[in-house]
Amino acid sequence: MNGNWPSDMLTEILLKLPVKSIIRFKCVAKTWCHLFQNPTFISQHLSVSKKNHKRLVVYYWDGNNDNFVMRLFVDQALDFYHDLHRPSHFASIYRSLVFCVDNGLFCLLDAANSILALWNPATTEFKILPQCNQNIPSKISAIADTLGFGLVPLSNDYKVVYIRSYLDLEKDMEEPAHIAIYSMSSDSWRVFEDEEVEFFRDNHICGNFNNACVNGVYYWHTFKSIDDSGYYDHKVLALNLGTEVFRLIDLPFSKRGGHLIPLHDRIAIWDTDLLVDIEISNEVWVLDDDGRNWTKVLKIEIPVLQVQRMFGFWKNNKVLVESVTGQLLLYDLEKEEAKELGIQTKEDWYFLFVHTYEESLVAIGNE
């Protein structure tokens, strides 16, 4: 079926195709079918997608129509999008839906029922994960669910981190969080021992809107109370998904928060938060390769807008931000111009989640 095409040239062409076309071409020849299932081809295709076909997923409360919407922008200019329809079990879940996106896959959590799943929108494969054996007493109530999810580059294994906080209903006291990690390659969970996580028990994770995975390390923004003054000590909690070891990282500004964002294969933090009455710098700091020191790389000033959150960098020196009125904007740092993306949530509702996404051929198995 290759005709006179050199195999290397043909592979280069196929690597640039969207997943939908590759699935359709599986029936062309057995050699093509085997090629599309080859881990090297799958990894190379993902790399091409990340470089040339990065997309944007937005999940938000649509203030115009009063409903929850998940949308996928399909072009680099962010001009066109369509609704992204979730698998049937999660189609009608809104307030209790928690999710992460990394390297072409979604990790979905129905927090109300403690159901976790993996989903590949490009191939439509969907799999509910086995129950994490939590052995939680009946008089304990869950009060918070936090996710982590990412690809381990060295092993090509996807891992899920599930952190669940509990309240003892009889004592009216918060119990130590239950923390477990799932490996897609083994289809199994491992519960962290107390001694592995005891050192950060006093740190509270800032929900699911301010976290990121970079190069197989997942980062959460955490805080703990300093004293009765109302100030908090902010740190970053990092988990190496390969070694499954946690550690706490000091921030360059410890008494206020910021927004964690990926930047050129490193984790960065943007020092801004209009929701707190503390002086901010609008500086972006990047964590060095040793994972211990931060370096200031730039200062972002958006003079014509009031911005309460930045979600990350886009193409051509542009950033994705949320205005104080709940609009998602693409801001050009050089031209100092803002482009409205047609996404409007409720003002001060903080219900706007933005993730970069690229198509992947990774198989997760259907259910």
Image: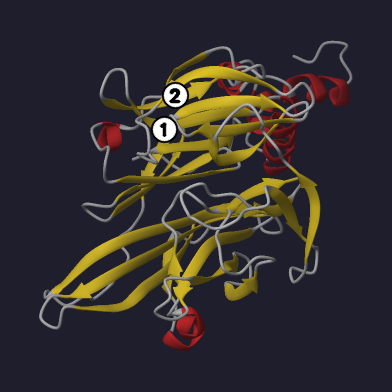
Q: Is residue 64 above or below residue 346?
A: above
Residue underneath mark 2: 71
Q: Hey, what amino acid is under mark 2?
A: Arg
Spot occupied by residue 191 in the image (x, y as percentages of width and height): 41, 75
Colour pattern:
secondary structure
Residue 227: image quadrant is bottom left
Q: Residue at x 44, y 59 (%)?
A: 206
- Labels 1 and 2: the sequence-earlier one: 1
Task: Say whether residue 123 is visible.
Answer: no
Question: From mark 1 to mark 2, how far is it between C-alphas?
Answer: 6 Å
287 relative position to 338: left or right: right
111 relative position to 274: left or right: left
Q: Nearer the viewer, residue 243 or 253?
A: 253
Classify the position of the C terminus by image quarter: top left
Spot occupied by residue 296 in the image (x, y as percentages of width and height): 79, 55
Is disc 2 placed on a helix, strand or loop? Answer: strand
Spot occupied by residue 152 in the image (x, y as percentages of width and height): 64, 57
Residue 249: image quadrant is bottom right
Q: Nearer the viewer, residue 125 or 261?
A: 261
Residue underneath mark 1: 59
Q: Are marks 1 and 2 in contact (CB under 8 Å)?
A: yes
Q: Residue at x 43, y 35 (%)?
A: 125
Q: Nearer the viewer, residue 49 or 197?
A: 197
